[in-house]
Image (cartoon, coloured by chain):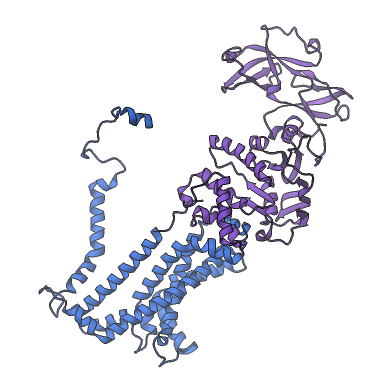
Chain colours: A purple, B blue
């Protein structure tokens, strides 16, 4: 499970409007810029109706992949199919895709309606039809009534809506979004997130988004591809990506994680044990790991999956072996507390000196007073919580 | 904020005192040394021009002593056929030079900005050459060129007889246009171009719909430069002009050789006014541009 190869197996619960056919297909796509390999042998199918996110740190090749769909880059090797058609020889202006650019690229010398109408004019749509569709598109992105404004009279968020309307008015098969939320402030970003999702459901067009923000990808996308140095690291639903990462890179990149290096000691079909020097004790798992005994593995444990309990100073009476079935327990001392309102983040020093992060929800108004600095605690987590990573 | 307006509480800030306090550390314009420098600079720049204009109304054959106000010399200038012809020649050459320089300069700028090709640095450097080469050398070079290599046929009807001068003017004016337009292109957001193509525009449409509007302030500034450079050029024109193709600066020079009459002042004043008006129009057109933030 944890070392599942990169696959495009259907997601467990696809959104209802997602169809089975692949509208986008990358087949062995490699892109080199001189000696630099930007995209390395990528095989990826994106189904019609998906809201797909390409996620990764800067320079991982996600934008290059998107630009290959738009036609601004051509693959060095491999093939790209849009709607079943090889698009190798299709220039950007002939492709059934449209893009929302990171800078929005709203034409500064045209008013809003002219911006939105531009694509239709290029297609030779007649004037009456253009007027109607432009109005519809502006309504769709909630910009009705601002059609006569010039772009410099709009806010950043409004300019982005213009860019969205301008791309959607052409009714593309696929809409490409390059870091759509990166330039917005936090409040507006949250709002735009949900609006993008509902917009996508309303128009039923496949959306492909590039982002470096894992929160954004998890929140919006039906499926994500995590990229690292040109390679696809993992393709999965947001929940699978977070709970079942297939590598240290994915576990670390998506969300916050405590990572322990260890040696696989025992590996049964429904039970396993990893010896971790840093933890000072073995980690019990209630599932098997498909790895060779004695091999090095990594235990990835999400901070919110660790519970804290009070401990009497000096007492190490409760050993892990004594802990209730299916629970791992280690002693530690609270070294740092960060109060964030909805939750509190603690940093706990284990006996070996290693520090572990844990998040605790503030369920009542007094919860943050439960623990204080330098307080001895037990850390406990369920045997099903950690992900064991082989790479 | 709306609530505050309703309650109308007195503002906590004391009412503005009349500006009598000491100037702030960065308010240089309120400190006397800078005011003196600015005043002296303006005086230095404009006093000669104002003198020239004032004496164009002087009722005297000599330009030295003020004798009274008159329009006489403007009348005289308007009735001077050869002066008028020179004036029309100058404007015609400047107009042709501007149009062709802007087209050539803009294309050169786009080429240097957009493409990479072997020998690009050489082309770039050689384009700047007419800007740095001493005008007198350019003048002599043009003289030799039109005398030996490419003799411009004489006796052509107006305005074809102005061809040699026009070509000479274009050769030194278009690099200025190219430089200005290139600087403007540096601020172009390439995503605008990609957006146009993404929306279905061809290369050509993208050029006209996105790139040219962005270049427009540069084109106007370049046109103004080319126009004024051509209008007041003396050295190069002097070497390429024939007896029947006299331009305004050359004509004024030949008039000066006899005596400095207020007629010259009058003609010069008209030229200054024309230039100022054209510059004002050009600046106005630039200001009307929508401010292009990185939209």
Q: Is residue A391 or residue A56 the one in the foreground?
A: A56
Above or below, A100 against B275 in this view is above
Across and down, in percent, residue B143 comes to: 42, 85
Across and down, in percent, residue A363 comes to: 62, 17
Across and down, in percent, residue B223 comes to: 42, 69
Residue in the image at 63% along x and 39% along y: A198
Identity of the residue furthest to the bottom in this view: B155
Residue in the image at 70% along x and 20% along y: A306
Q: Quadrant of the N terminus of chain A?
A: top right
Q: Quadrant of the C terminus of chain A?
A: top right
Across and down, in percent, residue B34 comes to: 26, 50
Residue A385 shown left or right of residue B222 in the figure: right
Q: Is residue A80 or residue A284 the one in the foreground?
A: A80
Above or below, A201 against B101 in this view is above
Determine which quarter of the picture holds residue A195. Answer: top right
Residue in the image at 23% along x and 57% along y: B40
Q: Is residue A118 visible?
A: no
């Amino acid at each position: 499970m944890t070392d599942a190869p990169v696959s495009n197996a259907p997601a467990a619960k696809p959104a209802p409007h997602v169809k089975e056919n692949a509208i986008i297909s990358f087949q062995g796509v490699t892109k080199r810029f001189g000696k630099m390999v930007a995209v390395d042998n990528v095989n990826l199918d994106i189904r019609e109706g998906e809201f797909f996110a390409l996620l990764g740190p800067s320079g991982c090749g996600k934008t290059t992949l998107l630009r290959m769909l738009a036609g601004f880059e051509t693959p060095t090797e491999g093939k790209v199919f849009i709607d079943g058609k090889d698009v190798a020889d299709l220039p950007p202006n002939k492709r059934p895709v449209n893009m929302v650019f990171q800078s929005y690229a709203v034409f500064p010398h045209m008013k809003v309606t002219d911006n939105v109408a531009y694509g239709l004019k290029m297609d030779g749509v007649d004037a009456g039809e253009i007027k109607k569709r432009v109005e519809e598109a502006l309504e769709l992105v909630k910009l009705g009534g601002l059609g006569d404004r010039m772009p410099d009279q709009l806010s950043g968020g409004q300019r982005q809506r213009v860019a969205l309307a301008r791309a959607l008015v052409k009714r593309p098969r696929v809409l490409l979004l390059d870091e759509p939320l990166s330039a917005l402030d936090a409040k507006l970003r949250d709002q735009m997130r949900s609006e993008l999702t509902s917009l996508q459901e309303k128009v039923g067009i496949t959306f492909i988004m590039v982002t470096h923000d894992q929160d954004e990808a998890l929140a919006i996308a039906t499926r994500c591809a995590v990229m690292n140095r040109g390679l696809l690291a993992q393709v999965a639903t947001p929940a699978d990506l977070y709970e079942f990462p297939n590598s240290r890179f994915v576990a670390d990149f998506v969300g916050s994680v405590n990572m322990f290096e260890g040696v696989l000691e025992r590996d049964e079909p429904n039970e396993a044990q990893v010896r971790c020097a840093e933890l000072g004790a073995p980690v019990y798992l209630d599932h098997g790991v498909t790895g060779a005994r004695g091999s090095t593995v990594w235990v990835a444990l999400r901070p919110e999956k660790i519970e804290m309990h009070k401990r009497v100073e000096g007492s190490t009476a409760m050993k892990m072996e004594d802990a209730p079935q299916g629970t791992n327990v280690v002693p530690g001392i609270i070294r740092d507390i960060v109060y964030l309102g909805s939750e509190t983040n603690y940093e706990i020093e284990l006996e070996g000196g290693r520090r572990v992060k844990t998040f605790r929800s503030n369920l009542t108004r007094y919860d943050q007073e439960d623990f204080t600095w330098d307080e001895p605690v037990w850390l406990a987590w369920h045997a099903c919580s950690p992900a064991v990573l082989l790479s | 904020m709306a609530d505050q307006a309703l309650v109308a509480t007195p503002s906590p800030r004391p009412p503005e005192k009349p500006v009598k306090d000491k100037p702030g550390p960065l308010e240089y314009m309120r400190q006397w040394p800078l005011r003196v420098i600015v005043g002296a600079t303006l005086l230095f720049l404009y006093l000669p021009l104002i003198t020239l204009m004032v004496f164009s109304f002087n009722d005297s054959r000599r330009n030295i002593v003020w004798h009274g106000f008159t329009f006489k010399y403007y009348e005289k200038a308007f009735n001077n056929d050869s002066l008028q012809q020179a004036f029309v020649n100058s404007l015609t050459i400047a107009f042709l030079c501007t149009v062709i320089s802007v087209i050539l300069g803009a294309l050169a700028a786009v080429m240097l900005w957009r493409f990479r090709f072997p020998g690009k640095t050489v082309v770039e450097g050689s384009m700047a050459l007419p800007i740095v080469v001493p005008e007198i050398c350019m003048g002599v070079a043009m003289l030799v060129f039109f005398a030996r290599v490419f003799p411009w046929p004489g006796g052509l009807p107006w305005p074809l007889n102005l061809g040699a001068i026009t070509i000479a003017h274009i050769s030194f004016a278009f690099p200025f246009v190219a430089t200005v337009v290139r600087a403007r292109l540096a601020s172009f957001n390439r995503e605008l171009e990609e957006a146009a193509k993404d929306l279905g525009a061809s290369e050509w449409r993208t050029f006209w719909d996105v790139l040219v509007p962005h270049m427009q302030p540069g084109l106007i500034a370049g046109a103004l430069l080319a126009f004024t450079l051509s209008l007041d050029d003396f050295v190069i024109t002097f070497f390429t002009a024939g007896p029947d193709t006299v331009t305004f600066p050359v004509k004024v020079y030949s008039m000066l050789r006899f005596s400095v009459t207020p007629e010259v002042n009058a003609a010069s004043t008209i030229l200054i006014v024309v230039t100022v008006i054209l510059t004002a129009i050009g600046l106005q057109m630039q200001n009307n541009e929508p401010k292009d933030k990185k939209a």
